[in-house]
Image: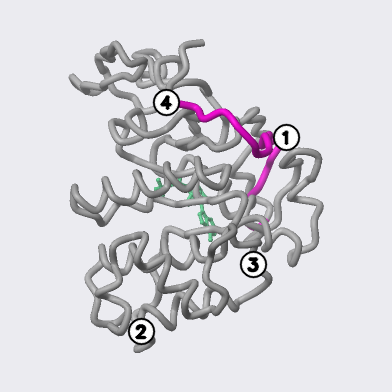
Amino acid sequence: MRDIGIFDGAGEILALDGISAGYRRRPVVHDVRLGPLPPASITALVGPNGAGKSTLLKGLAGAMPVRGRAMLGSRDLIAMTPRDRARLVAHMPQALPDRVALTVLDAVIGALRAGPAGDPPPGTPKGDAERAVAVLDRLGITALALQPLDTLSGGQRQMAALAQALVRDPRVLLLDEPTSALDLRHQYRVMATVRDLARERALQVIVVLHDLDLACRWAHRIAVLGQGRLHAFGTPAEAVTPRILHDVWGVAARVDARDDGRVRVEVEGLA
Ligand SMILES: Nc1ncnc2c1ncn2[C@@H]1O[C@H](COP(=O)(O)OP(=O)(O)OP(=O)(O)O)[C@@H](O)[C@H]1O
């Protein structure tokens, strides 16, 4: 397998086994077996609207019931108590934070205090407010700290939501379309920050993305979900093929392999 930029080093492998989830007895995610996901890596979860991507993330985050196993090293996230899982997993949902009068800084501090958080890396400031400020700084949004959420643009609220997930110092970071409202500069900033954090802290990152170019550019692994089932998993070149684009998205597309092992997708029409 041609691999791109996976970092050597510490960290635990994540592997999903037989994950199923649904709503009021309507199954939506079916028996997903995914992995092993290397430590310190980004896995992009892609697929058409309604494929079950958000449902899968919510299940892993403990926000809805789920069957199966999600092994982080030797620990099963699904079998853990909510408190133990909250220490390891942070979830940025698709829905943006409410338009409330809370400032960004208070919202990020609130996220940190919402439950038991992970252990911060050495050198992290001790106080909750200092920890929150450090995350805003890392994301380049310190200037928003004292602005109320209800005065922010959609993209700014998306950055605030990401800060709420990052401040918890998780081992597993689940991001649901974190760049959908962002301009090019902020898309780059978010993906580069997430990549750097994955490397520095040996995080597992699973990120839902609709933009396949963004996914192929930043992710080490791509998982393709269609109608709640896993259709492909591998490096971008392995998982994003004309056949998969045809079968899962219903489009006719050209996929150009690049020298660096990444791919570029050109949709030419509907299949
Ligand atoms: N709260 C809910 N109650 C009932 N059904 C739901 C609920 N949320 C999602 N669904 C259904 O589950 C299916 C999968 O939805 P999900 O949001 O997981 O898909 P997705 O792949 O994230 O889609 P998108 O790319 O459009 O965000 C859809 O058919 C959707 O209608």
Residue 54, placed above or below residue 212: below
Dot 2: what SS? loop
Give the magenta-colored segment's residue range: 5-24
Mark-to-mark CA distance, 2 and 3: 21 Å
Dot 4: what SS? helix
Q: Nearer the viewer, mark 3 or mark 4?
A: 3
Does residue 236 appear left or right of residue 75 in this picture?
left
Residue sticking out furthest to the bottom? 101
Task: Name the N-terminal-most of marks 2 and 1.
Answer: 1
Q: Quadrant of the C terminus?
A: top left
Residue at image mark 3: 117
Task: Name the N-terminal-most of marks 2 and 4.
Answer: 2
Residue 236, horizontal then vertical, whole percent: 41, 22
In this view, the residue in front, 75 or 119, is 119
* Label 4 crowd bin: few (<14), some (14–19), many (20+), radius 10 Å: some
Dot 1: what SS? strand
Residue 196: which quarter of the image?
Answer: top left
Mark-to-mark CA distance, 1 and 3: 27 Å
Does the stretch in magenta take in 112?
no
Give the residue at x 32% y 16%.
260
Task: Name the N-terminal-most of marks 3 and 4.
Answer: 3
Mark-to-mark CA distance, 3 and 4: 37 Å
Does the stretch in magenta take in 7?
yes
